[in-house]
Image: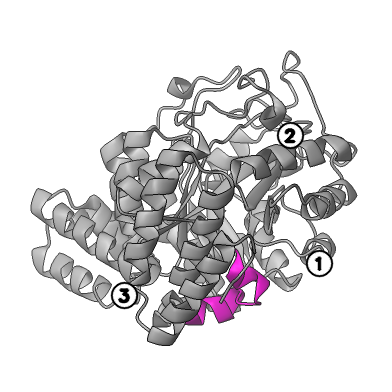
């Protein structure tokens, strides 16, 4: 039985409801009056149900698709402006006891070198990331209660926050680790993490159990119910996602939106972020062995429709995707991207990108400076802002500001100020020139004159050597 407010994974992600929604979508994919009604509802910026969004996903009318894309672009601008938040993943350990068949870190892989960073190595990785200009990290680790216990993760978070190199500082640490207990989520909250991120991989229970044949991750219910435990533990910003390509994309799309609806129904706040990774080649992993891959056009459509269905959420795209794909989906709804990522344990301190312990192939291998300049050339503001988290604007407080549009009164100037820091401390001369012009143009787009004046003075102070101003 489907019940979005249930705490039982098999009820808030009901296989029967997903299948009925897909059948409804197939029956109505050419129902123009209904599609028109759904698009009109989406234009209200209040979101769509999983069933309504599934109808749009099934619709293949070219003109309607363009309308969906245009609306997604406008909604993204309404909620997030032209800001793109920058982050980088930091891999702490590739020790893992799970048997996930799509991941090179699975325990049966005996030829991949296993590595776990010491605290000194964590600090060196952080310095390397700070020297690029990063301010926000997402830490990653395999599931291994002996090598990667919660105390190790907590110690790493403490180390990351403690490193201050030149003008560098990591101001927000998001955590992407395996599903755990309420007690451990409380410990992560006390360590002042930002968002807790956990990808479902696939919501199709039978496929999930086949893809995770061994290890604690095999338990579908425990994994799927993790966000409820995280919320109970006090973490009010959570990030969800699926690994597209493992199962049928329409099933995953509907179930992903059902998970967002569940979080709203139970906790009053939906996912802070939704990630949209696609399976990529890695050591011992050939994506072609999974027969549910999606092409770039389908991927772009999924991104646009997530924006229509969950207009307030932050959408994340990683360096798994190429520059061309990232450019397309940024327009359609993506609001956060990684830059200069290395998906190896200890990869940032190496001069040449190491590949022997990569979790997946990195398609976009540009430097952070190159990514920043590219974004600005496309009219976006690369933002290194972490102010909302540090000012306590998380969970329902963030969402209420975001849904009302008021968050732009602080996010726009904060983005410009953190961009100014990057330009002063890390940018090439060409990037700095482009960025200075962009900042002067974008200052004029701050609606409140008083805020605009304060932002100008803060930016002048940054040029004089001061750092870390925020609204």
Cα separation, mark 2 vs mark 3, equals 40 Å
The label nearer to you, 2 versus 3, is 3
Query: In this picture, is 153 found above or below 101?
Result: below
Quadrant hosting residue 217: top right
**x 82%, y 47%: residue:** 156
Residue bearing the label numbered 2: 98
**x 40%, y 40%: residue:** 430
Query: In this picture, is 270 found above or below 96?
Result: below
Badge 2 element? loop
- Of 5 and 89, the residue lying toward us: 89
The tag earlier along the polypeptide, 2 or 1, is: 2
Badge 1 element? helix
**x 32%, y 43%: residue:** 327
Query: In this picture, is 456 found above or below 211?
Result: below
Rendering coords of residue 112 (x, y %): 72, 17
Can I make out residue 443 in this image?
yes
The tag earlier along the polypeptide, 2 or 3, is: 3
The label nearer to you, 2 versus 1, is 1
Give neighbour class at mark 3: few <14, some 14-19, many 20+ (Cα, 10 Å). Answer: many
- Of 359 and 382, the residue lying toward us: 382
The magenta stretch spans which residues?
A: 386-401
Rendering coords of residue 228 (x, y %): 66, 67
Q: Looking at the rendered structure, which numbered label has been put on residue 45?
A: 3
């Amino acid at each position: 039985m489907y019940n979005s407010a249930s705490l039982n994974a098999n009820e808030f992600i009901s296989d029967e409801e997903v299948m009925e929604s897909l059948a409804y979508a197939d029956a109505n994919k050419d129902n123009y009056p209904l599609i028109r009604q759904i698009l009109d509802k989406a234009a209200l910026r209040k979101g769509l149900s999983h069933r309504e969004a599934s109808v749009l996903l099934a619709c293949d009318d070219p003109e309607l698709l363009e309308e969906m894309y245009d609306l997604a672009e406008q909604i993204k601008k309404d909620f997030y402006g032209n800001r793109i938040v920058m982050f980088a993943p930091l891999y702490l350990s590739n020790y893992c006891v799970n048997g996930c068949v799509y991941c090179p870190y699975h325990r049966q892989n005996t030829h991949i070198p296993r590595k776990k960073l010491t605290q000194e190595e964590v600090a060196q990785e952080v310095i390397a990331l700070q020297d690029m200009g990063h301010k926000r990290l997402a830490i990653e680790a395999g599931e291994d209660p002996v090598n990667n216990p919660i105390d190790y993760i907590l110690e790493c978070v403490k180390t990351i926050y403690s490193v201050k190199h030149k003008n560098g500082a990591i101001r927000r640490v998001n955590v992407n680790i395996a599903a755990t207990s309420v007690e451990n989520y409380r410990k992560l909250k006390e360590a002042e993490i930002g968002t807790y991120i956990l990808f479902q991989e696939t919501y199709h229970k039978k496929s999930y159990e086949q893809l995770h044949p061994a290890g604690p991750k095999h338990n579908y219910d425990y994994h799927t119910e993790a966000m409820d435990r995280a919320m109970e533990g006090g973490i009010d910003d959570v990030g969800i996602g699926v690994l597209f390509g493992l199962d049928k994309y329409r099933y995953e799309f509907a179930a992903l939106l059902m998970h967002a609806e569940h979080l709203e129904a139970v906790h009053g706040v939906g996912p802070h972020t939704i990630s949209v990774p696609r399976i990529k080649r890695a050591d011992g992993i050939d994506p072609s062995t999974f027969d549910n891959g999606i092409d770039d056009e389908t991927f772009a459509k999924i991104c646009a429709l997530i924006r229509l269905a969950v207009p307030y959420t932050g959408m994340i795209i990683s360096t798994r995707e190429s520059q061309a794909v990232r450019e397309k989906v940024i327009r359609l709804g993506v609001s956060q991207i990684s830059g200069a990522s290395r998906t190896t344990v200890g990869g940032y301190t190496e001069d040449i990108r190491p590949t022997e312990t990569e979790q997946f192939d990195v398609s976009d291998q540009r430097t952070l400076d190159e990514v920043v300049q590219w974004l600005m050339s496309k009219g976006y503001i690369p933002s290194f802002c972490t102010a909302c988290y540090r000012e306590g604007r998380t969970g329902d407080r963030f969402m209420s500001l975001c849904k009302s549009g008021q968050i732009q009164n602080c996010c726009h100037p904060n983005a410009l100020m953190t961009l100014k820091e990057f330009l002063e401390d890390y940018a090439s001369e060409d990037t700095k020139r482009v960025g200075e012009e962009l900042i002067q143009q974008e200052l004029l787009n701050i609606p409140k004159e008083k805020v605009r004046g304060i932002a100008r003075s803060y930016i002048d102070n940054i040029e004089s050597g001061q750092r870390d101003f925020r609204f």
